[in-house]
Amino acid sequence: MSPRPDPAAGGGSARAAAPGRAAATARAAAAPAHDGPLLDVRGLTVEYATARGSALAVDRVGFTLDRGEFLGIVGESGCGKSTLLFGIAQLLSPPASTTAGSVLFKGRDLVGMTDRQLADVRWSELSVVMQSAMNALNPVTTIGAQFRDVLRAHSFDTDIGTRSREVMELVGVDPVHLDSYPHQLSGGMRQRAMIAMALLFTPDLVIMDEPTSALDVVAQRSLMVQIKQLQRELGFAIIFVTHDMSLVSHFSDRLIVMYGGQIAELGATRTVFDTPRHPYSKGLLDAFPSIHGPRVPLLGIPGSPPDLADLPTGCRFAARCPQAMPSCAATAPELYQVEQVRVRCLLHAHEEVTA
Ligand SMILES: Nc1ncnc2c1ncn2[C@@H]1O[C@H](COP(=O)(O)OP(=O)(O)OP(=O)(O)O)[C@@H](O)[C@H]1O
Protein backbone atom coordinates (compact mmCIF):
# COMPACT_ATOMS: atom_id res chain seq x y z
CA MET A 1 0.00 0.00 0.00
CA SER A 2 3.03 2.32 -0.13
CA PRO A 3 1.97 5.60 -1.65
CA ARG A 4 4.66 5.82 -4.32
CA PRO A 5 4.63 9.41 -5.54
CA ASP A 6 1.86 9.70 -8.07
CA PRO A 7 2.42 12.98 -9.78
CA ALA A 8 -0.29 12.25 -12.31
CA ALA A 9 -2.76 12.22 -9.45
CA GLY A 10 -1.77 15.74 -8.58
CA GLY A 11 -4.12 17.67 -10.80
CA GLY A 12 -3.68 21.38 -11.20
CA SER A 13 -3.31 23.32 -8.01
CA ALA A 14 -3.02 27.04 -8.25
CA ARG A 15 -2.75 27.04 -4.47
CA ALA A 16 0.57 25.26 -4.67
CA ALA A 17 2.08 27.64 -7.17
CA ALA A 18 4.74 28.84 -4.75
CA PRO A 19 6.36 26.15 -2.58
CA GLY A 20 8.29 26.80 0.57
CA ARG A 21 7.48 29.05 3.45
CA ALA A 22 5.94 31.59 1.08
CA ALA A 23 3.52 28.91 -0.09
CA ALA A 24 2.42 28.13 3.43
CA THR A 25 1.72 31.81 3.99
CA ALA A 26 -0.04 32.20 0.63
CA ARG A 27 -2.09 29.08 1.34
CA ALA A 28 -3.12 30.36 4.73
CA ALA A 29 -4.20 33.63 3.13
CA ALA A 30 -6.10 31.91 0.30
CA ALA A 31 -7.77 29.17 2.36
CA PRO A 32 -11.16 29.77 3.94
CA ALA A 33 -10.70 30.77 7.57
CA HIS A 34 -10.55 27.73 9.80
CA ASP A 35 -10.35 28.21 13.55
CA GLY A 36 -10.48 24.60 14.69
CA PRO A 37 -7.67 22.07 15.00
CA LEU A 38 -5.56 21.30 11.95
CA LEU A 39 -6.85 17.74 11.99
CA ASP A 40 -9.98 16.41 13.62
CA VAL A 41 -10.39 12.65 13.26
CA ARG A 42 -13.80 11.41 14.38
CA GLY A 43 -14.88 7.81 14.76
CA LEU A 44 -12.57 6.68 11.96
CA THR A 45 -13.15 3.02 11.17
CA VAL A 46 -11.19 1.00 8.62
CA GLU A 47 -11.93 -2.62 7.79
CA TYR A 48 -10.13 -5.21 5.68
CA ALA A 49 -12.36 -7.63 3.79
CA THR A 50 -10.85 -11.07 4.41
CA ALA A 51 -11.91 -14.64 3.66
CA ARG A 52 -12.74 -15.00 7.36
CA GLY A 53 -14.87 -11.87 7.40
CA SER A 54 -14.10 -8.29 8.18
CA ALA A 55 -10.93 -7.39 10.14
CA LEU A 56 -11.54 -4.24 12.16
CA ALA A 57 -8.05 -2.71 11.93
CA VAL A 58 -9.09 0.80 13.00
CA ASP A 59 -12.11 0.98 15.26
CA ARG A 60 -13.77 4.35 15.91
CA VAL A 61 -10.54 6.26 16.38
CA GLY A 62 -10.89 9.93 17.23
CA PHE A 63 -8.38 12.65 18.14
CA THR A 64 -7.41 16.17 17.19
CA LEU A 65 -4.07 17.60 16.18
CA ASP A 66 -3.06 21.25 16.35
CA ARG A 67 -0.76 23.07 13.98
CA GLY A 68 2.89 22.39 14.74
CA GLU A 69 2.13 19.51 17.09
CA PHE A 70 4.09 16.22 17.14
CA LEU A 71 1.83 13.24 17.83
CA GLY A 72 3.40 9.81 18.33
CA ILE A 73 1.49 6.56 17.78
CA VAL A 74 2.82 3.40 19.38
CA GLY A 75 1.59 -0.15 19.79
CA GLU A 76 2.51 -3.71 18.96
CA SER A 77 2.82 -4.98 15.43
CA GLY A 78 -0.60 -5.48 13.83
CA CYS A 79 -2.53 -3.13 16.15
CA GLY A 80 -3.52 -0.91 13.22
CA LYS A 81 -1.01 1.96 13.31
CA SER A 82 -0.18 1.98 9.59
CA THR A 83 -3.80 1.41 8.64
CA LEU A 84 -4.76 4.43 10.74
CA LEU A 85 -2.18 6.57 8.89
CA PHE A 86 -3.42 5.34 5.52
CA GLY A 87 -6.97 6.00 6.65
CA ILE A 88 -6.12 9.56 7.66
CA ALA A 89 -4.40 10.23 4.33
CA GLN A 90 -7.19 8.32 2.54
CA LEU A 91 -4.58 6.22 0.77
CA LEU A 92 -6.41 2.98 1.42
CA SER A 93 -6.90 0.46 -1.33
CA PRO A 94 -8.84 -2.84 -1.36
CA PRO A 95 -9.22 -4.98 0.65
CA ALA A 96 -9.13 -2.00 3.05
CA SER A 97 -11.84 0.63 3.15
CA THR A 98 -13.08 3.37 5.43
CA THR A 99 -16.43 2.18 6.73
CA ALA A 100 -17.25 5.00 9.13
CA GLY A 101 -16.04 8.31 10.50
CA SER A 102 -14.49 11.46 9.19
CA VAL A 103 -11.06 13.06 8.82
CA LEU A 104 -11.51 16.80 8.97
CA PHE A 105 -8.31 18.40 7.69
CA LYS A 106 -8.47 22.17 8.02
CA GLY A 107 -12.22 21.75 8.29
CA ARG A 108 -12.68 19.71 5.09
CA ASP A 109 -13.54 16.02 5.30
CA LEU A 110 -10.99 13.90 3.41
CA VAL A 111 -13.33 10.91 3.63
CA GLY A 112 -15.54 11.01 0.57
CA MET A 113 -13.30 13.39 -1.40
CA THR A 114 -12.73 12.44 -5.03
CA ASP A 115 -9.29 11.21 -6.09
CA ARG A 116 -8.71 14.51 -7.78
CA GLN A 117 -9.62 16.50 -4.66
CA LEU A 118 -7.35 14.30 -2.55
CA ALA A 119 -4.49 14.60 -5.04
CA ASP A 120 -4.80 18.34 -4.77
CA VAL A 121 -4.36 18.19 -0.98
CA ARG A 122 -1.60 15.56 -0.90
CA TRP A 123 1.98 16.74 -1.18
CA SER A 124 0.92 20.37 -1.10
CA GLU A 125 -0.88 20.42 2.27
CA LEU A 126 -0.40 16.93 3.65
CA SER A 127 2.37 14.50 2.79
CA VAL A 128 3.25 10.98 3.83
CA VAL A 129 6.73 9.54 4.49
CA MET A 130 6.78 5.77 4.48
CA GLN A 131 8.88 3.27 6.38
CA SER A 132 10.93 2.34 3.35
CA ALA A 133 11.92 5.03 0.90
CA MET A 134 13.19 2.20 -1.28
CA ASN A 135 9.58 1.09 -1.77
CA ALA A 136 8.10 4.55 -1.92
CA LEU A 137 10.57 6.02 -4.42
CA ASN A 138 10.54 4.98 -8.05
CA PRO A 139 13.69 2.85 -8.55
CA VAL A 140 14.12 3.68 -12.24
CA THR A 141 13.94 7.46 -11.99
CA THR A 142 16.43 9.89 -10.46
CA ILE A 143 15.51 11.68 -7.25
CA GLY A 144 15.49 15.00 -9.10
CA ALA A 145 13.09 13.72 -11.77
CA GLN A 146 10.73 12.47 -9.06
CA PHE A 147 10.78 15.87 -7.37
CA ARG A 148 10.16 17.52 -10.73
CA ASP A 149 7.16 15.29 -11.44
CA VAL A 150 5.58 16.09 -8.08
CA LEU A 151 6.20 19.83 -8.51
CA ARG A 152 4.84 19.86 -12.05
CA ALA A 153 1.79 17.84 -11.10
CA HIS A 154 0.93 20.71 -8.76
CA SER A 155 1.47 23.35 -11.43
CA PHE A 156 4.86 24.43 -10.16
CA ASP A 157 6.82 24.81 -13.35
CA THR A 158 9.45 27.42 -12.71
CA ASP A 159 12.50 27.22 -10.45
CA ILE A 160 12.08 23.47 -10.11
CA GLY A 161 15.84 23.02 -9.81
CA THR A 162 16.14 25.71 -7.17
CA ARG A 163 13.34 24.30 -5.03
CA SER A 164 14.68 20.76 -5.39
CA ARG A 165 18.13 21.86 -4.24
CA GLU A 166 16.61 23.84 -1.36
CA VAL A 167 14.75 20.86 0.09
CA MET A 168 17.76 18.55 -0.31
CA GLU A 169 19.83 21.08 1.64
CA LEU A 170 17.08 21.32 4.25
CA VAL A 171 17.45 17.63 5.02
CA GLY A 172 21.24 17.67 4.85
CA VAL A 173 21.78 15.83 1.56
CA ASP A 174 24.11 17.26 -1.07
CA PRO A 175 21.87 18.42 -3.97
CA VAL A 176 24.28 16.65 -6.32
CA HIS A 177 22.27 13.56 -5.42
CA LEU A 178 19.27 14.88 -7.30
CA ASP A 179 20.98 13.12 -10.20
CA SER A 180 21.18 9.83 -8.28
CA TYR A 181 18.83 6.89 -8.49
CA PRO A 182 17.41 5.67 -5.16
CA HIS A 183 19.64 2.56 -5.08
CA GLN A 184 22.74 4.78 -5.34
CA LEU A 185 21.98 6.40 -1.98
CA SER A 186 22.51 4.97 1.51
CA GLY A 187 19.39 4.05 3.50
CA GLY A 188 19.66 7.24 5.57
CA MET A 189 20.06 9.43 2.50
CA ARG A 190 17.07 7.79 0.83
CA GLN A 191 14.90 8.46 3.86
CA ARG A 192 16.13 12.06 3.90
CA ALA A 193 15.38 12.40 0.18
CA MET A 194 11.88 11.07 0.86
CA ILE A 195 11.45 13.66 3.62
CA ALA A 196 12.79 16.34 1.26
CA MET A 197 10.14 15.35 -1.26
CA ALA A 198 7.47 15.52 1.46
CA LEU A 199 8.58 19.08 2.18
CA LEU A 200 8.57 20.35 -1.41
CA PHE A 201 5.44 22.40 -0.71
CA THR A 202 5.97 22.93 3.03
CA PRO A 203 2.76 21.08 3.94
CA ASP A 204 0.80 21.70 7.13
CA LEU A 205 0.93 18.03 8.10
CA VAL A 206 3.55 15.34 7.53
CA ILE A 207 2.49 11.79 8.31
CA MET A 208 5.41 9.46 9.02
CA ASP A 209 5.24 5.68 9.24
CA GLU A 210 8.38 4.49 11.01
CA PRO A 211 10.62 6.61 8.77
CA THR A 212 13.75 5.73 10.73
CA SER A 213 13.19 2.06 11.48
CA ALA A 214 15.50 0.79 8.73
CA LEU A 215 18.42 2.89 9.99
CA ASP A 216 21.10 2.16 12.56
CA VAL A 217 20.73 3.85 15.94
CA VAL A 218 23.12 6.72 15.17
CA ALA A 219 21.55 7.54 11.78
CA GLN A 220 18.13 7.20 13.38
CA ARG A 221 18.87 9.71 16.11
CA SER A 222 20.43 12.21 13.71
CA LEU A 223 17.46 12.00 11.34
CA MET A 224 15.03 12.47 14.24
CA VAL A 225 16.90 15.54 15.47
CA GLN A 226 16.74 16.93 11.95
CA ILE A 227 13.02 16.19 11.58
CA LYS A 228 12.36 17.99 14.86
CA GLN A 229 14.46 20.98 13.80
CA LEU A 230 12.64 21.21 10.47
CA GLN A 231 9.34 21.00 12.26
CA ARG A 232 10.29 23.90 14.54
CA GLU A 233 11.58 25.94 11.63
CA LEU A 234 8.76 25.29 9.17
CA GLY A 235 5.90 24.79 11.63
CA PHE A 236 4.28 21.65 10.20
CA ALA A 237 2.51 19.11 12.38
CA ILE A 238 3.69 15.50 12.50
CA ILE A 239 1.94 12.20 13.10
CA PHE A 240 4.67 9.68 13.73
CA VAL A 241 4.21 5.93 14.01
CA THR A 242 6.95 3.92 15.68
CA HIS A 243 7.69 0.84 17.75
CA ASP A 244 10.41 2.76 19.53
CA MET A 245 9.25 4.16 22.85
CA SER A 246 12.49 6.08 23.37
CA LEU A 247 11.96 7.99 20.10
CA VAL A 248 8.47 9.12 21.07
CA SER A 249 9.56 9.95 24.60
CA HIS A 250 12.13 12.39 23.23
CA PHE A 251 10.33 13.88 20.29
CA SER A 252 6.54 13.73 20.58
CA ASP A 253 4.26 16.20 22.39
CA ARG A 254 1.33 13.82 22.66
CA LEU A 255 1.03 10.08 22.40
CA ILE A 256 -1.57 7.57 21.25
CA VAL A 257 -1.11 4.04 22.54
CA MET A 258 -3.02 1.73 20.21
CA TYR A 259 -4.24 -1.74 21.00
CA GLY A 260 -6.41 -4.01 18.88
CA GLY A 261 -7.39 -1.26 16.43
CA GLN A 262 -8.45 1.17 19.16
CA ILE A 263 -6.96 3.98 21.19
CA ALA A 264 -6.00 2.46 24.53
CA GLU A 265 -4.56 5.69 25.93
CA LEU A 266 -4.09 9.22 24.62
CA GLY A 267 -2.38 12.07 26.40
CA ALA A 268 0.67 14.25 26.75
CA THR A 269 3.72 12.06 26.16
CA ARG A 270 5.35 13.04 29.44
CA THR A 271 2.18 12.25 31.40
CA VAL A 272 1.71 8.85 29.75
CA PHE A 273 5.36 7.96 30.39
CA ASP A 274 5.31 9.19 34.00
CA THR A 275 1.87 7.79 34.90
CA PRO A 276 0.69 5.17 32.42
CA ARG A 277 -2.96 4.54 33.29
CA HIS A 278 -3.78 1.71 30.92
CA PRO A 279 -2.24 -1.63 31.95
CA TYR A 280 -1.19 -2.08 28.31
CA SER A 281 0.68 1.25 28.28
CA LYS A 282 2.37 0.17 31.48
CA GLY A 283 3.30 -3.16 29.90
CA LEU A 284 4.75 -1.43 26.83
CA LEU A 285 6.81 0.90 28.98
CA ASP A 286 8.05 -1.96 31.13
CA ALA A 287 9.17 -3.72 27.95
CA PHE A 288 11.52 -0.87 26.97
CA PRO A 289 14.79 0.02 28.66
CA SER A 290 14.99 3.43 30.31
CA ILE A 291 18.15 5.32 29.40
CA HIS A 292 18.17 7.44 32.53
CA GLY A 293 16.32 5.42 35.16
CA PRO A 294 17.67 2.71 37.43
CA ARG A 295 18.46 -0.68 35.89
CA VAL A 296 15.41 -2.89 36.19
CA PRO A 297 14.65 -6.21 34.48
CA LEU A 298 12.62 -5.75 31.28
CA LEU A 299 9.25 -7.42 31.21
CA GLY A 300 7.51 -8.49 28.02
CA ILE A 301 3.73 -8.61 27.71
CA PRO A 302 2.71 -12.28 27.81
CA GLY A 303 0.17 -13.52 25.26
CA SER A 304 -0.64 -12.14 21.85
CA PRO A 305 -2.86 -9.38 20.44
CA PRO A 306 -6.49 -10.15 19.57
CA ASP A 307 -7.57 -11.41 16.17
CA LEU A 308 -9.08 -8.34 14.53
CA ALA A 309 -11.43 -10.55 12.52
CA ASP A 310 -12.73 -12.25 15.66
CA LEU A 311 -12.67 -9.74 18.49
CA PRO A 312 -13.68 -10.59 22.05
CA THR A 313 -16.88 -9.11 23.49
CA GLY A 314 -15.25 -7.33 26.39
CA CYS A 315 -11.92 -5.57 26.76
CA ARG A 316 -9.54 -6.56 23.96
CA PHE A 317 -6.61 -6.59 26.38
CA ALA A 318 -8.34 -8.55 29.15
CA ALA A 319 -6.79 -11.91 28.27
CA ARG A 320 -3.29 -10.46 28.77
CA CYS A 321 -4.03 -7.92 31.47
CA PRO A 322 -2.43 -8.34 34.91
CA GLN A 323 -5.18 -6.16 36.40
CA ALA A 324 -8.18 -7.79 34.67
CA MET A 325 -11.40 -7.96 36.68
CA PRO A 326 -14.33 -10.36 36.10
CA SER A 327 -16.29 -7.60 34.30
CA CYS A 328 -13.50 -7.07 31.74
CA ALA A 329 -14.32 -10.19 29.77
CA ALA A 330 -17.95 -9.14 29.30
CA THR A 331 -17.89 -5.35 29.09
CA ALA A 332 -16.10 -3.41 26.36
CA PRO A 333 -14.56 -0.33 27.97
CA GLU A 334 -15.22 3.16 26.60
CA LEU A 335 -12.57 5.86 26.47
CA TYR A 336 -12.68 7.56 29.86
CA GLN A 337 -11.36 11.02 30.61
CA VAL A 338 -8.90 10.79 33.50
CA GLU A 339 -7.58 14.28 34.19
CA GLN A 340 -5.97 15.30 30.88
CA VAL A 341 -5.63 11.73 29.58
CA ARG A 342 -8.12 9.42 27.83
CA VAL A 343 -7.96 5.78 28.84
CA ARG A 344 -9.88 2.74 27.58
CA CYS A 345 -9.92 0.65 30.74
CA LEU A 346 -12.69 -0.36 33.14
CA LEU A 347 -10.45 0.57 36.06
CA HIS A 348 -11.51 4.13 35.14
CA ALA A 349 -15.17 3.40 34.34
CA HIS A 350 -16.28 5.85 37.06
CA GLU A 351 -14.84 8.71 34.99
CA GLU A 352 -16.59 10.61 32.21
CA VAL A 353 -16.86 8.84 28.84
CA THR A 354 -15.29 10.71 25.91
CA ALA A 355 -15.89 10.42 22.16
N1 LIG B 1 -3.87 -6.66 3.27
C1 LIG B 1 -4.51 -7.01 4.38
N2 LIG B 1 -5.52 -7.88 4.34
C2 LIG B 1 -6.19 -8.21 5.46
N3 LIG B 1 -5.93 -7.73 6.68
C3 LIG B 1 -4.92 -6.88 6.79
C4 LIG B 1 -4.15 -6.47 5.66
N4 LIG B 1 -3.21 -5.59 6.09
C5 LIG B 1 -3.40 -5.47 7.41
N5 LIG B 1 -4.43 -6.24 7.84
C6 LIG B 1 -4.97 -6.34 9.20
O1 LIG B 1 -4.87 -5.07 9.79
C7 LIG B 1 -4.20 -5.15 11.03
C8 LIG B 1 -3.42 -3.90 11.23
O2 LIG B 1 -2.33 -3.86 10.33
P1 LIG B 1 -1.32 -2.64 10.32
O3 LIG B 1 -0.31 -2.89 9.27
O4 LIG B 1 -2.09 -1.38 10.24
O5 LIG B 1 -0.68 -2.75 11.78
P2 LIG B 1 0.59 -2.01 12.37
O6 LIG B 1 0.25 -1.71 13.78
O7 LIG B 1 0.96 -0.87 11.49
O8 LIG B 1 1.69 -3.14 12.30
P3 LIG B 1 3.27 -3.00 12.09
O9 LIG B 1 3.76 -2.29 13.31
O10 LIG B 1 3.73 -4.40 12.00
O11 LIG B 1 3.48 -2.20 10.82
C9 LIG B 1 -3.38 -6.43 10.97
O12 LIG B 1 -3.29 -7.02 12.22
C10 LIG B 1 -4.21 -7.32 10.05
O13 LIG B 1 -5.16 -8.00 10.83
Image: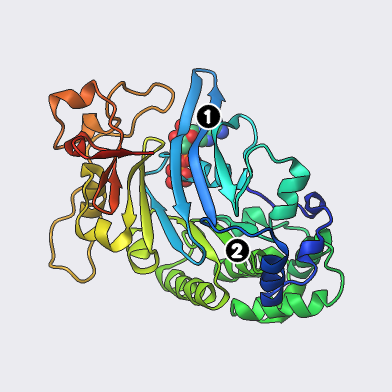
In the picture, the disc for residue 239 is none
Q: Is residue 102 above or below residue 292?
A: above
100, 310: nearer the viewer:
100
Q: Position of residue 13 (x, y in %)?
A: 80, 59
Residue depth check, mark 2 versus mark 1: number of the one nearer the observer? 2
For label 1, the crowd category at 10 Å Cα-Cα, with few meaning under 14, some 14 to 19 and many 20 or more, is many
For mark 2, give the secondary structure: loop
Q: Position of residue 245 (x, y in %)?
A: 33, 58
For mark 1, give the secondary structure: strand
Q: Is residue 181 left or right of residue 80?
A: right
* Mark 2 to mark 1 CA distance (whole Å): 27 Å
Question: Tag 1: residue type?
Answer: Glu
For label 2, the crowd category at 10 Å Cα-Cα, with few meaning under 14, some 14 to 19 and many 20 or more, is many
Q: Residue at x 38, y 53 (%)?
A: 243
317, 236: nearer the viewer:
236
In the picture, the disc for residue 47 is 1
Q: Is residue 134 above or below residue 62?
A: below
Query: Is residue 229 in sight in this rendering?
Result: yes
284, 189: nearer the viewer:
284
